[in-house]
Amino acid sequence: MLKPVPFYFLRHGETAWNRRAIMQGHTDIDLDVSGEHQAREVAPAVAALPIATICTSPLRRAVHTADIVNVNRRPVALIDELKECCFGIYEGQPSNGPWRKDWR
């Protein structure tokens, strides 16, 4: 029988494109100052959790968030499958643009 273990999910901090409601997808946008602040704010809570390994997307915004919250220096695993959906030609476009109706 498998032993249940807790799983904690933390979304990356804010980016300039998040703030402007621009689709990011696989476009590799880093955190902005606000996103760095958000990660620092949550870091103590993450440090208190019984986490063995931090798994993250290899995109800069996710890796940067993981680096900031990893105050206990736990192992970090980059997992390509944790990337956001790829929106192709719609990346860099407004997230509420007319293209989104057809995508949904």
Image: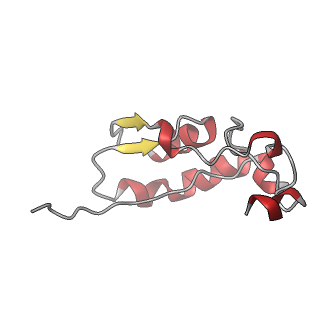
Q: Residue furthest right?
A: 98
Judged left or right of residue 24, residue 94 is right
Q: Quadrant of residue 1?
A: bottom left
Judged left or right of residue 16, residue 13 is left
- Residue drawn at 67 percent across, 50 percent down: 35
Q: Height in image: 19 above or below 69?
A: below
- Residue drawn at 41 percent across, 44 percent down: 55
Res 71 seen here: no
Question: Residue 2, position in %: x, y?
Answer: 14, 60
Q: Height in image: 17 above or below 103?
A: above
- Residue drawn at 37 percent across, 53 percent down: 47
Q: Quadrant of residue 78?
A: top left
Name the one closer to the observer, 26 or 73. Answer: 26
Name the one closer to the observer, 93 or 55. Answer: 93
Question: Residue 61, position in %: x, y?
Answer: 62, 41
Judged left or right of residue 69, residue 39 is right
Name the one closer to the observer, 67 or 24. Answer: 24
